[in-house]
Image (tube, rainbow, N blue to C red):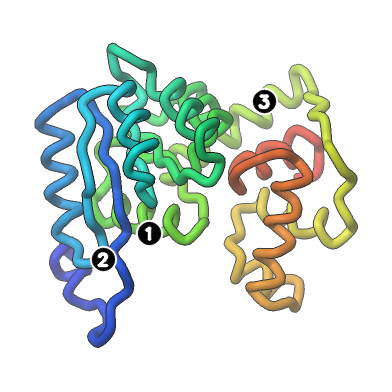
Amino acid sequence: MTLLDHMSSGASGHQPAPIRALVVDDHDLFRTGLSSLLAASPDLEVVAQASGGRMGVRLARELKPDVVLMDLRMPDLDGVDAIRAIVEDDPAARIIALTVASDEGDVAAAVLAGACGYLVKDSPIDDVVIAVRAAARGDAWLSPRAASALVDRVRRNNVEAPAEPEVSAELSPRELEVLRLVARGLENSEIAAELGISPRTAKNHLSSILAKLGMTNRIQAAIYAVRSGLA
């Protein structure tokens, strides 16, 4: 299905406010092309473009976009550092990392800095749109290659040197169950079905887990679960 076909299948009637996106990339052709493709979707609005990391941080602070798409390779400010700066300023920021390859070190660094998603630049535009929508509603999204790279990296490092993350409060038995399912890649609706609870309850459990662990997204929680031997 083409991007236009995908968008034309949306529901009619009252439409919610569009998702406001900021695109940060130092390659003009890629940045403007991606922005145009995203803007072709009626539920997405590109509120600004930034040609570098420092500008991206400034625009994210000023415009408070719903989602930031951040290139990881920029000359003025590394994408990981830009992600970290945005999240430090606004812990609720939703950022999707973009790069040319799913190098496992890049994936781990971006996620640990606060990214809630990771896409390689040759991903189909439909995947980019899906990732932006997922980020806007509070979900995490990794391309299959990026997810595999991240899990492999974390599991291997866990074997070589088990991490002992500091936990500000103990998780309840139910929260541990939810965390294990998060590490398996299940979304809130799937967790709810697995545990026989409502999606809202599953979301509330995840919010409590993130607060107790001092984390900003479910991918970071999944990394913690793997490193702690929970998954």
Total labels drawn: 3
| Residue type for callout 1 | Arg
Tell me the mark number nearer the camera, choosing from 1 and 3: 1
| Residue type for callout 3 | Arg
State left or right for residue 218 relative to residue 145. Answer: right
* Residue with the most extreme bottom position: 13
Nearer the observer, 52 or 230: 52
Q: Is residue 207 above or below residue 58?
A: below
**Circle 1 residue:** 133
Contact, mark 1 vs mark 3 (Cβ under 8 Å): no
Secondary structure under tag 1 reads helix
Nearer the observer, 124 or 89: 89
**Circle 2 residue:** 43
Query: What distance separates the C-alpha of mark 2 from that of mark 1?
Result: 9 Å
Where residue 159 sits, quadrant-wise, is top right
Q: Is residue 149 visible?
A: no
Where residue 154 sits, quadrant-wise, is top right
If the image is split into quadrants, where does the N terminus sit?
bottom left
Label of residue 201 in the image: none
State left or right for residue 211 relative to residue 102. Answer: right
Q: Is residue 193 above or below residue 44?
A: below
Secondary structure under tag 3 reads helix
Q: Residue at x 64, y 73 (%)?
A: 199
**Circle 3 residue:** 156
Nearer the observer, 13 or 151: 13
